[in-house]
Image (spheres, coloured by chain):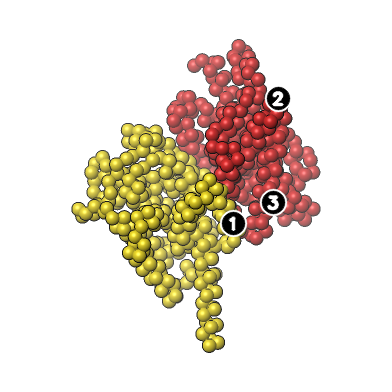
Amino acid sequence: MSADPALSPRRSLQSRVATLVFVAALLVFPAVYHNPFALHMMSLVAINAMVALGLQLLFGFSGQLSIGQAAFYGIGAYTSGLLTTKLGVPFPAALLASGVVASVASLLMVPVTRLSGVYLAVSTIGFSILVHLVLMNEEWLTGGTFGLIGIPRVSLFGYTLRNPAYSYFLCVGCALAVYAALVRLERSRFGRAINAIRQNEDAARSSGLAVTYLKSQCFVIAAFIAGLAGSLYAHQVRYLAPDDFTFWKSIEFLFMVVIGGVGSLFGAVLGAAFVVLLPEWLREIGDYRMLVFGALIVTAMLFGTRGLAGVLAATGRALGALMRRAAASG
Amino acid sequence: MDQAYFLDLLVGGLAIGCVYSLVALGFAMIIRATGIIHFAQGEVLMVGSMSGLSTLWLLPRLPAVAVMLIAMLASGIVSVAMEFFVYRTLRVRRIPIMNVITATVGMSILFINAARIIWGSEPLRYPDLFGTLAYTFAGVRISPQLVWIMVMGLVLMGILQLFLKYTRTGLAMQAVAQDPDAAQMMGANLTRMMVYTFGVAGIMAGAAGVMVGSLFFSFFQMGFIIGLKGFIAATLGGLGSLAGAMLGGILFGLIETFAAVFVSSAYKDGIGMVLLIFILLASPSGLVGLWKRRR
């Protein structure tokens, strides 16, 4: 497919400019609109976008459907929450530890990677349910259904980030770093290898790719990212309850990827914004909020198979064509 | 261990297993015919359960069988309506299967919240449908509910098997599920068979809805966890195999019931999951795969 921007070796000038404008917009957002709630919501979008990006790698790139990312997100959140509250570990160490613990937990999924399609998805659902049960029942560790309270704010190098704008920058910064890393990964040898696996596993294997190893690596990377995001989440909301990490949350992450557009990193970000912000915007209609949300998801699936990213690309192309035509005629 | 207690658990496990089997059958039929994991299957069940209950509010003296038939009808209609208005459009537009599955989750959210608006968010108790007089088997008293649920579940599954094996429509549905193109060339009407498939899946879920309602209660979110377990049971059996789905459901019900008593009630859902993962690892295509390999 020549139209696929992900596979073209060099990015066009427009997309570079678009990325630059997007990042700049994110950076000036707090200065322009300094509303603590809006900044909090945007931080949540960034956190969710990280998990969605990881899932995009797992599902969109390597073709492994996981409906259990909330498990790794939860493991990361609780690791960070417990390390900082109970052991007084500084935030940067806790952040890293969250990623590491989540990725170690994901090693449990290594045997499962040899399953395919729906069977893999069901195993990840099972894992997600198990982790939720552990969070709920091991009260000595996690506080059970009462949750984990009193998680400190993020403090970096002795400064506590009290200003919501600072924690916004932290979350957005982490999300951008993950985004940049995955963009690099997508075009690397590794990225091409997992792309080959998604398209035809047998062919990839016969071309000498260590399929199971590569697939497991995807799981570990996605879990590491989800763990980091979980840590940020723990310090953003400063209260953890097991019900934040149910199977529904995993479904939400999947929504982000599918609504954003399977296989598109930027789509995952758009999808995260859609899934996190839309229910907030719909809050005014009260009881009908989730009804409309469900209907919107069904409708979104009716239009555009490539998700929001596809819609955006189509709009961009149409605009470009329009501008070229305008330039040519006058 | 006490024999009476064991029998009690066995019947309880079989009864809840029958419920899972009915749901799993719906999943298996739909996935076989269309490839869709129909995540709204639990909500179809919930609609059946709620409709049965609403009918009982209007006509308290209605016999259990009639309530069940009404619930089956309601669920069947809802399921067919979903196919007709949503999934058919998606299929005609050749939307990728992952998007269709996401749409089914969207439908599920839609129905859960519609139900909350219609029936409220309180759990609703079912009146005693099957009488309160306990049956006695070999000196052991067993709740009539469990026995009836088991009997009705098995009868329904039997009827489904007969329908699929011995009627033209049933055979055509099977043929379409196996090879849509060939079946169409033999004169099977693909579109109509899809409607039938969703209809039958809905009917099974509706019956399961009344059963669950009478065992526990009706609740706008009830479909979610039961639907999930039904789906897992269908996977356990080997997706797309009807016999596997039935077996998977009953097995899942038994595992869950016994695990709750003998291992840990807090982790009863988890034990089923761990076993599921191990079974899938041993046989990546479910129980049916294991059986086929044996032969």
- Above or below B99: residue B40: above
**Amino acid beneath label 3:** Phe
Residue B37 position, x and y percent, is 59, 47
- Residue that mark 1 sits on: A299
Q: How many marks?
A: 3
Residue B148 position, x and y percent, is 66, 24
Q: Chain of mark 2?
A: B
Locate residue B157: give its quadrant. top right
**Amino acid beneath label 2:** Arg
SS class, disc 3: helix
- Residue that mark 3 sits on: B84
* Badge number at residue B61: 2
Question: Residue at left 53%, top 61%?
Answer: A307
- Above or below B140: residue B25: below
Is residue A59 something one can see in this rendering? no
Quadrant where the C terminus of chain B lies?
top right
Q: Colour of chain B?
A: red
